[in-house]
Image (cartoon, rainbow, N blue to C red):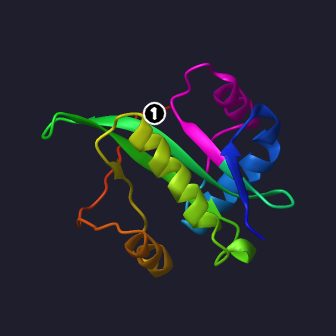
Amino acid sequence: MTPFVRRAIAGDAPELLGLIRDHAAFERGMASITSDDLDALLTMPSPPSLIWVAEAEGLTGYAALTFDYALWSGERFGHLDCLYVRPEQRGQGTARHLFKAVADATASSGAARLEWQTPFWNANAHQFYTRMGATSVQKHRFHLPLGR
């Protein structure tokens, strides 16, 4: 079944929060966003993250887009912050539809490119992104907790 991809709305928050938590667990992490945080994000007039959901008898996946600026090139770019599809829905084109929605939104915003990262151990994601025409640059990603 071809998923219907659309921008997330406030009513999606409970099911979307489940997907976000599943995604974090899949990547061996933990999501700290709360239901209230997600409700607020989905109702902001200019949210810091744009979210798409795939629907086929419930939400089957989601993708999140943020924007950043690259000093070296002097260009604004899109950052695919998240792309996740429920394991039982994989291989049915859902990720491709979500990825295309994010890429199209990035292009229509005037951004120069779309960037993202995925865990080094996620070979299926590497293969998917390569099939989508992406190339990779090896880097280590660091983070510094700042006491939030």
**Towards the viewer: 110 or 81:** 110
Question: Who's the residue at 28% across and 68% down the image?
Answer: 135
- The quadrant in which residue 95 appears is bottom right
In this rendering, the count of numbered labels is 1
Mark 1 Cα-neighbour bin, 10 Å: few <14, some 14–19, many ≥20: few
Give how far across and how far down residue 27 sits, in percent: 54, 65
Give how far across and how far down residue 24 sits, in percent: 60, 58
Secondary structure beneath dot 1 equals loop
Q: As displayed, is residue 41 above or below residue 100? A: above
> From where the camera sits, is residue 25 visible?
no
- The quadrant in which residue 146 appears is top left
Question: Which residue, given by chain and number where applicable, does mark 1 sit on?
Answer: 147
**Residue 7 is covered by the magenta coloring:** no
Question: Who's the residue at 70% across and 40% down the image?
Answer: 8
Q: As displayed, is residue 88 above or below residue 60? A: below
Quarter of the image with the N terminus is: bottom right
Question: Who's the residue at 55% across and 50% down the image?
Answer: 101
Which residue reaches farthest top?
A: 45
Which residue reaches farthest left?
A: 72
Q: Amino acid at mark 1?
A: Gly
Tell whether 36 sits left or right of 67: right
Give how far across and how far down residue 16 sits, in percent: 73, 48
Tell whether 108 sits left or right of 10: left
**Segment tinted magenta in the rendering:** 31-52
Give how far across and how far down residue 93 sits, in percent: 63, 71
Tell whether 84 sits left or right of 87: left
Which residue reaches farthest right?
A: 57
Question: Who's the residue at 81% across and 61% down the image?
Answer: 56
